[in-house]
Structures are given as structure tokens and as C-alpha cells.
Image (cartoon, rainbow, N blue to C red):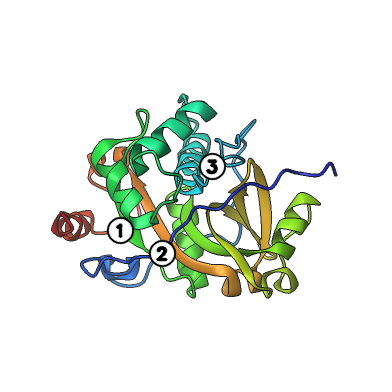
Amino acid sequence: MTDRITGLFGRLPALIPAALHEIEHYFAGSLPAAPATVAVPSVTAWGMGGNDEYGDCGVIGLGHGFMAAAADTARAETFPTDAQDVSYYLAYTGGEDDGVVLSAYLAHVRANGFYGHTVGAYVPVSVTSLSHIRFATWAYDFCYTGCVVTAAMMSAFSAGQPWTLEEVQGTPVGGHCVPLVGYDATYLYCVTWGAIQPIAWSAWDVMASEAWAVMTGELVTAGDDGHGLNLAALQADLARLN
């Protein structure tokens, strides 16, 4: 496999607002069981989104999530160019290339949109509950996550190799944002640096820092996420953040 280009980092330490409960709180009972596998959506080109020159992974990660959701639901949508991604990122940060806090960025997009794409609601997901990670990835077409990356992980990515427990146990070199867009019995699959990257389940336990289920504006407009989540209660808690 041709070497792939590793990019930069830009995920700042996680901040989980006290007003938000984890996802299971918003269900009357257990979360529905997710299927054993979720196929990676068919996207012709994910795009780097400027993440080879800027630490805009938080912006690109959500943008890739929107792309996954559009592909999963067969919606014909347009997405920004790399230059537009960078422009949005720098406008958000006030011109500084200093990264984003994922929860704060989700709040920003919920209030302001992203090139015609909207976040209607979002909720934290426990990174240690693999069943909840599966559910979020399946039910909402992607799971917006933050992780730490080691030098060995960068080398494995460049060589087209999966991230395994061996690679993730080194010293972290940066905080990164990757959306999970599929999984099977062996791997989770994320989008990073313009490509699909397999992550061994055992590696996920070590590298993961935060995870978010993101409901699109279309779901919230419809008033039903299709899986039993109490959107009214979640929206009320999100309103408290303002």
C-alpha cells in the first residue's frame, strides 16, 4: 500500500459539561442493541480538510461525520472544500491555530451550522462502554470521538496498518479527533487524515478520551431519533448550557 500522509493534531483536553448526562440517561430502559457489524459508508474521497497544515481535526472530524451520515442515508449533499474547512476553523478560533475543545465546537455548530449542515443535539457516550460506542456509531451514522495518538500509531497509519494495542501504548504525541463510522468483530473504523483507519477494540480502550453521539438537525426537526432517545429531555439539558 502506498504510504499515507499523516497530519497534525488539534483536539484539546475533553470538557464534559456538568448539565449533560451520558446517553443512557435519555432512554427509558437500556439502549437498543446495535448490530454486530456496521459497514463503512461508501465515500469516494474523504478529503484531508487542511489537517495536513492546520490542527483543525475537530472541524474535519465533524465534517467527515456529516459525510458519513449523508452516505448512510443516500442523501445528495455538498461539502466544503479544504480551503473552506480551514477558513471555518480559523474563524472559530479567532485566527489562531490552537485546536478545539470538542464539546465547545459541537455547541458552536449547533448554534451556527456548518456550510448548510446542522447539529440538532449531542450527548456524551462512555468510551469504556463498547456497546454504547457501537450504538452511537450505528444509530447516528457516526460517533464523534477524541483520542491520543502515539508516534507508533502515526507510523502504522502511514504504512496502511491498523492501530493495535502495541502501537497505542507508547507516549502520546498529540490529541486527535476522529469520527467512528463503522465496526466489525475485529476493528472499529475511523476517518482520519483523509483515509479510513482500522482500530483494534483492545487499542480503543487505551487511546480513547471522549466520545459523542451527534443527532443531525433533520432528526431533531422530526422530533424522533428513531431509537427511543428522549430528545425533549436532552434539548432541555443542552439549553442549560447557554
Mark number, residue 54: 3
Q: Does label 3 or label 2 sit earlier along the sequence?
A: 2
Packing grade of label 1 (10 A; few <14, some 14-19, many >=20) is: some
> Which residue occupies 18% across, 58% down?
241
Kindly report the distance in space between the C-alpha atoms of the residues bearing marks 3 and 2. 38 Å
| Image quarter hosting the C terminus | bottom left
Nearest the camera: 176 or 213? 176
Kindly report the distance in space between the C-alpha atoms of the residues bearing marks 2 and 1. 8 Å
Residue type at the position of mark 1: Gly
Residue 83 placed where, x, y %? 50, 27
Asked whether the viewer can see residue 80, the reply is no
Q: Does label 2 or label 1 sit earlier along the sequence?
A: 2
> Which residue occupies 76% across, 57% down?
155
Q: Dot 1: what SS? A: loop
Quarter of the view holding residue 216: top left
Mark number, residue 32: 2
Kindly report the distance in space between the C-alpha atoms of the residues bearing marks 3 and 1. 39 Å
Nearest the camera: 132 or 66? 66
> Which residue occupies 57% across, 41% down?
51
> Relative to residue 167, is residue 210 drawn left or right?
left
Packing grade of label 2 (10 A; few <14, some 14-19, many >=20) is: some
Mark number, residue 228: 1
Mark number, residue 62: none
Q: Dots 2 and 1: beta carbons under 8 Å?
A: yes
Residue type at the position of mark 3: Tyr
